[in-house]
């Protein structure tokens, strides 16, 4: 049996990787610190333009707008699973009675199985931490002393990582109920949210939604027809299965903003034994890859008569107790996922109460911008009077329609523009 911690750490690293959608795509692994604390550095997105400077000046100092660095005490994840002598004497599941395998051989397999089970449990906790940041802007962590306390949710110490000042301003409110919106209005809501992020200096590229939202969109005939217009490259809807309860619904083009749509319906078993969803039903999140990172703090425990520390993402160890005649397989981790930009995403829920006015909706996400950009629309007569393909294409791009080329005849270009304009900018 392998008992040296450094060997076990390398063994964990070589195990079959577990795909974590939120963790891997949006909060990938970052630094590991030789400390119980982790440094998190964040900065608000900005769109400052560089100034022109008189050559002899040499340069003008730009303020580091919105930058902050905090040292946070990393949460503590510690799991253990025992291996008993009685367990080793029994035939393993699926093992032939004539196998002749010894308890020592079974011990190695059971140790590996326990390590893999605990590793996956830690990964699920990390995934849930990332989901909490996206939906609530914070992580509330309850630290328990015993498994019984955890199962009954009693006698715990609470630690919270919060990524907003006074109010979570990344939660968007609709002005109409989702059911009452037309297809065109839903698409306009997508664009309005993308605009808010764009004005924050953020480019949203992903729409992550729960299965109930995805089902409504993917069974909406008008929605599907909008993205399969003849000769117009506005997007594709192609379902393909991804690991960990994720499906990609394809790419869509909303007024020049390209989104990749994902359906996320992964579940986990909570400490009380109840199966829950990582994302609340009705969630729509507008995200972008690499919007955050995950730092790690060191793990310290007693070995012999002294303390040893390991700065690793996951630290396993094996401890034998001759008095109790058991071997414990233990696993530790101290992850700190955090967003690089506190304003770098927006989340909405189709079942949340609606805003009483547009002002309230705008205030919910801390923006005073108009819901749609200023564009000058031409009438149908003006579009029909255009005799040059280049003029039609230039106008199409000015209102957010891309994908038209001179390969189309003039009538096709005009029809595509009129149809797009009618659906996106309809009253």
Image (spheres, rainbow, N blue to C red):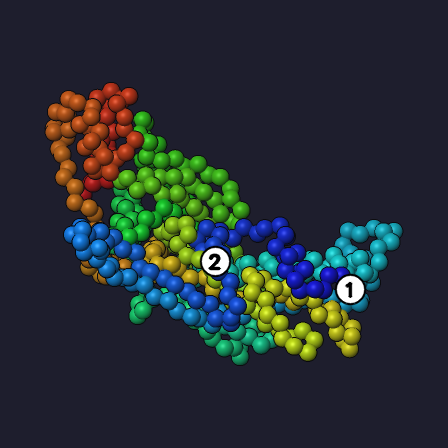
Residue found at x 78% / y 56%:
92
Q: In which quarter of the image is the C terminus?
A: top left
Q: In the image, which disc is placed on residue 5?
A: none
Label 2, label 1: how many angstroms apart (C-alpha)? 39 Å
> Compared with residue 163, is residue 218 higher up or lower down, i.e. above or below?
above
Which comes before the other along the chain, label 2 or label 1?
A: 2
Residue found at x 72% / y 64%:
3
Residue found at x 40% / y 44%:
261
Determine the secondary structure under disc 1.
Answer: helix
> Compared with residue 149, is residue 205 higher up or lower down, i.e. above or below?
above
Q: Residues within 10 Å of mark 2 (few under 14, many from 20)?
A: some
State the image coordinates of residue 265 (x, y, percent, origin top left).
Answer: 48, 51
State the image coordinates of residue 389 (x, y, percent, origin top left).
Answer: 20, 23
Q: Mark 1 points at which residue?
A: 87
| Residue 225 visible to an observer of this rendering | no
> Compared with residue 241, is residue 371 higher up or lower down, i.e. above or below?
below
In this rendering, would 152 be left or right of 229?
A: right
- Residue in the foreground of this view, choosing between 352 and 187: 187
Q: How crowded is mark 1: few (under 14 residues within 10 Å), some or many (20 or more)?
A: some
Q: Mark 2 points at which residue?
A: 30
In this rendering, would 82 be left or right of 387?
A: right
Q: In which quarter of the image is residue 390?
A: top left
In this rendering, would 132 be left or right of 204?
A: right
State the image coordinates of residue 44 (x, y, percent, origin top left).
Answer: 31, 59
In the rendered picture of this protein, how many numbered marks are placed on residues?
2
- Residue in the foreground of this view, choosing between 68 and 392: 68
């Amino acid at each position: 049996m392998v008992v040296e911690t450094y060997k076990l750490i390398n063994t964990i690293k070589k195990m079959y990787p577990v795909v974590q959608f939120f963790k891997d795509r949006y909060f990938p692994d970052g630094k590991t610190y030789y400390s119980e604390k982790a440094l998190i550095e964040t900065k608000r997105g900005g769109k400052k333009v560089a100034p022109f400077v008189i050559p002899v000046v040499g340069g003008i100092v730009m303020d580091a707008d919105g930058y902050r660095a905090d040292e946070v005490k990393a949460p503590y994840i510690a799991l253990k699973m025992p291996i008993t002598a009685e367990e080793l004497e029994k035939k393993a599941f699926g093992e032939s009675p004539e196998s002749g395998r010894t308890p020592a051989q079974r011990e190695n397999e059971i140790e590996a199985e326990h390590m893999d089970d605990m590793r996956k449990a830690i990964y699920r906790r990390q995934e849930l931490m990332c989901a909490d940041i996206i939906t609530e802007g914070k992580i509330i962590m309850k630290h328990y002393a015993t498994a019984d306390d955890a199962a009954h949710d009693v006698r715990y110490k609470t630690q919270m990582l919060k990524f907003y000042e006074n109010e979570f301003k990344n939660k968007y409110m609709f002005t109409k109920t989702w059911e009452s919106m037309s297809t065109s209005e839903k698409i306009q809501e997508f664009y309005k949210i993308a605009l808010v992020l764009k004005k924050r200096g953020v480019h949203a590229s992903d729409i992550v939604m729960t299965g109930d939202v995805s089902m409504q969109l993917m069974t909406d005939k008008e929605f599907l027809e909008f993205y399969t217009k003849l000769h117009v490259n506005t997007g594709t809807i192609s379902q393909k299965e991804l690991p960990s309860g994720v499906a990609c619904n394809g790419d869509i083009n909303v007024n020049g903003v390209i989104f990749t749509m994902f359906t996320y319906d992964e579940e986990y078993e909570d400490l009380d034994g109840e199966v829950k969803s990582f994302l609340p039903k009705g969630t729509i999140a507008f995200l972008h890859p690499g919007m955050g990172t995950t730092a790690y703090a060191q793990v310290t425990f007693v070995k012999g008569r002294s303390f040893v520390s390991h700065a690793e993402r996951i630290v396993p160890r094996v401890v034998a107790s001759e008095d109790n005649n058991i071997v414990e397989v233990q696993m530790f981790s101290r992850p700190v996922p955090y967003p690089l930009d506190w304003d770098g995403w927006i989340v909405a829920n189709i079942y949340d109460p609606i805003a009483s006015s547009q002002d309230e909706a705008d205030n919910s996400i801390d923006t005073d911008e108009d819901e749609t950009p200023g564009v000058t629309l031409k009438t149908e007569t003006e579009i029909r009077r255009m005799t040059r393909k280049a003029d039609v294409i230039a106008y199409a791009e000015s209102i957010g329609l891309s994908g038209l080329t001179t390969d189309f005849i003039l009538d096709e270009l005009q029809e595509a523009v009129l149809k797009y304009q009618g659906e996106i900018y309809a009253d």
